[in-house]
Image: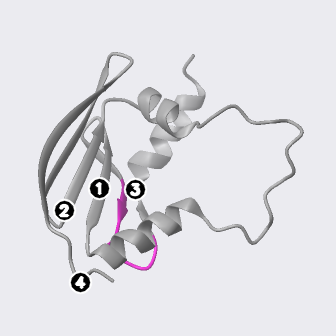
Amino acid sequence: MASGLEIEAQLVISLDGDDVQVAASGTYLIINVPSQRVLDKLTSGPPKDPNAPPKPKNAPDPLQQLNDLALRLGLVLDLRVAGKTYVTFGTGRSPKITLNAVLGKIGSFFKS
């Protein structure tokens, strides 16, 4: 297991004309997505198969898995949308979801 990973990086990833910014210094990593629409596009995944069996009730939570990985690597991952922190991973036993994330997700339901 790693005792602590340190990173220095600045990266801009263009996705369908939208720029996702990644910056890291030491053990702190920031991913900034320009809007809730882009975040929804990134996290939607492939289309769901209507004939696929449902997930088992004891299936692992992907957010918790990401938090556990950040803790093991000694990193803090800060996911931001339009410069506002939505979720922080690696600072405690579970990811910290902010009120901005909740309000942003609710607002995305009302946009076309």
Q: Please rate how many residues cluster around mark 1, counting C-alpha atoms within 10 Å: few if below 14, some from 14 to 19, many from 20.
A: many
Which of marks 4 and 2 precedes in the sequence? 4
> Please, what is the three-letter code of the amino acid marked with disc 4?
Ser
Place of residue 31 in the rendered image (x, y in percent of width and height, measured from the top left): 28, 46
Q: Are marks 3 and 4 in contact (CB under 8 Å)?
A: no
Q: Marks 2 and 3: which is nearer the front?
A: 2
Place of residue 11 in the rendered image (x, y in percent of width and height, measured from the top left): 18, 38
Which of marks 1 and 3 precedes in the sequence? 1
Residue at image mark 3: 98
Colour mode of the rendering: one colour
Q: Please rate how many residues cluster around mark 3, counting C-alpha atoms within 10 Å: few if below 14, some from 14 to 19, many from 20.
A: some
Q: Marks 3 and 1: which is nearer the front?
A: 1
Residue at image mark 2: 28
| Residue lying at 64% horizontally and 34% vertically, measured from the top left | 46
Of residue 51 and residue 19, the one placed in the foreground of this image is 51
Q: Are marks 2 and 1 in contact (CB under 8 Å)?
A: yes
Q: Secondary structure at mark 3?
A: loop
Which of marks 1 and 2 precedes in the sequence? 2
Residue at image mark 4: 3
